[in-house]
Amino acid sequence: MSNLSETWSKSTTAIFNGVLLYSLGGILHPIFNFINSTASTVNTLSSFAQGNFSSGGPSALSIICKILIAAIILGYYLYLKGLSDFAKILDSTDSTAVGTIRSATIVILIGWVLSFVFGFLPFVGFVGRLISGILCLIAYIMMLQGYSTLKKSSTFPEQARKGASSLFTAIVLLLCAIIIGLIPLIGGIPSMILNIIAFIMVLSGWAKIKNAVANPTTTMNNQ
């Protein structure tokens, strides 16, 4: 039981920290990247106007952008690693559900990579965004299936089931945000609000699971 509780705590803490890192990094990076791009453009134009064509070293803003990218990568690593370790201590049904959530996360990452790659190709950037959107939709449906299983788990502690229920609701909100975001002119702000609420619920959900005490009935797959 002690080993189970220790592994439960270690793996879910990694998941929670991973979600926190990649979420905050994902929110802050576009902001700092925009500021850095704007400042870089202004500095370049100013240098040209003064006849100075030499390029300086990396600015503090560009370093912050690189740190945020590293935080996003580390966050996803911790999240995926935590899910893998968490699945190992659950029964077959719950383990499969966590595996589905992990696979869904990988699908989302693939969609983002394709969108990024296509973004560099002339006239086909929309193809990448379309593929990314379809993959995200599929991934969210996969996550709904996974969290639906976990929130009804007979081996999860009650607090962990509540956490899974919060995560299920968060994914529903993210799906609604995608749909509402498609509405021209008026969809942006409601979509942003839903994304913020979903972000808070995701953190709250994994915090509940992290702080739950594993049931004695929760057994490891290989036992």
Image: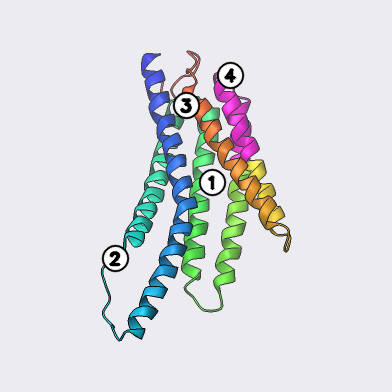
Find numbered disc 4 in the image and state the secondary structure of the residue it sits on.
helix
Q: Nearer the viewer, mark 1 or mark 3?
A: 3
Residue bearing mark 4: 158
Vertical position of residue 197 compared to residue 159: above or below: below
Q: Is residue 54 left or right of residue 29?
A: left
Vertical position of residue 185 compared to residue 68: above or below: below
Residue bearing mark 3: 210
Find numbered disc 3 in the image and state the secondary structure of the residue it sits on.
helix
Q: Position of residue 6 (x, y in %)?
A: 37, 21
Q: Examine the structure image and report whether residue 143 is included in the region drawn in magenta.
A: yes
Separation of disc 4 and disc 1 at Cα?
A: 25 Å
Colour convention:
rainbow
Q: Which residues are magenta?
A: 142-170
Residue 188: quadrant of the picture = bottom right
- Nearest the viewer among 167 and 2 is 167
Q: Is residue 34 left or right of residue 185?
A: left
